[in-house]
Image (cartoon, rainbow, N blue to C red):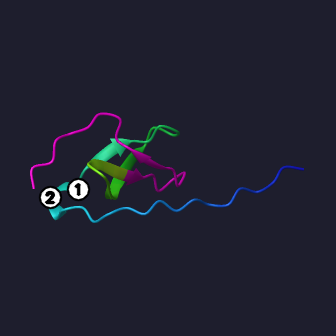
């Protein structure tokens, strides 16, 4: 019997409203994921279907 893994919470910082409409392709299921915040200078996304949290692989420069 396998162990059930505890869900990991990533603490993200707020993202300016202009970037909250960004979407990225989920690395697991391929659907569009919405932005939930930022970690350092990268936007963090969460897929609603599979609940995966990930960062965008290519960095886009922020100008705030």
Left or right of 7, for residue 16: left
Q: x, y (%) of residue 61?
A: 16, 42
Closest to the observer, 8 or 17: 8
Where is mark 2, residue-wise? 18
The furthest residue to the left: 63
Magenta-tinted stretch: 45-64
Q: Residue at x 90, y 50 (%)?
A: 1
Residue 32 in the image: above or below residue 46: above
Residue occupying image coordinates x 52% and y 39%: 28
User: Is 61 covered by the magenta stretch?
Assistant: yes
Element marked by disc 2 = helix
Q: Residue furthest right?
A: 1
Identify the residue shown where x is 51% and y is 40%.
29
Q: How far apart are labels 2 and 1 at the CA level? A: 7 Å
Circle 1 is placed at which residue position? 21
Q: Residues within 10 Å of mark 1 (few under 14, many from 20)?
A: few
Q: Relative to residue 41, is residue 1 drawn left or right?
A: right
Dominant SS type (magenta): loop
The mark lying in front, picked from 2 and 1, is: 2
Q: Mark 2, residues whose alpha carbon is within 10 Å: few (<14), some, or many (≥20)?
A: few
Quadrant hosting residue 25: top left
Where's the C terminus, which quadrant?
bottom left
Q: Position of residue 22 (x, y in %)?
A: 25, 50
Asked if residue 18 lies left or right of residue 34, the reply is left
Instruction: Tell me the SS state at disc 1.
Output: loop
Residue 9 to residue 22: above or below = below
CB atoms at circles 2 and 1 under 8 Å apart?
yes
Q: Is residue 55 left or right of residue 43?
A: right
């Amino acid at each position: 019997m396998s162990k059930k893994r505890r869900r990991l919470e990533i603490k993200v910082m707020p993202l300016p409203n202009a970037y909250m409409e960004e979407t990225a392709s989920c690395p697991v299921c391929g659907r569009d994921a919405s932005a939930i915040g930022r970690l350092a200078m990268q936007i963090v996304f969460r897929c609603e279907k599979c609940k995966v949290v990930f960062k965008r692989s290519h960095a886009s420069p922020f100008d705030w």
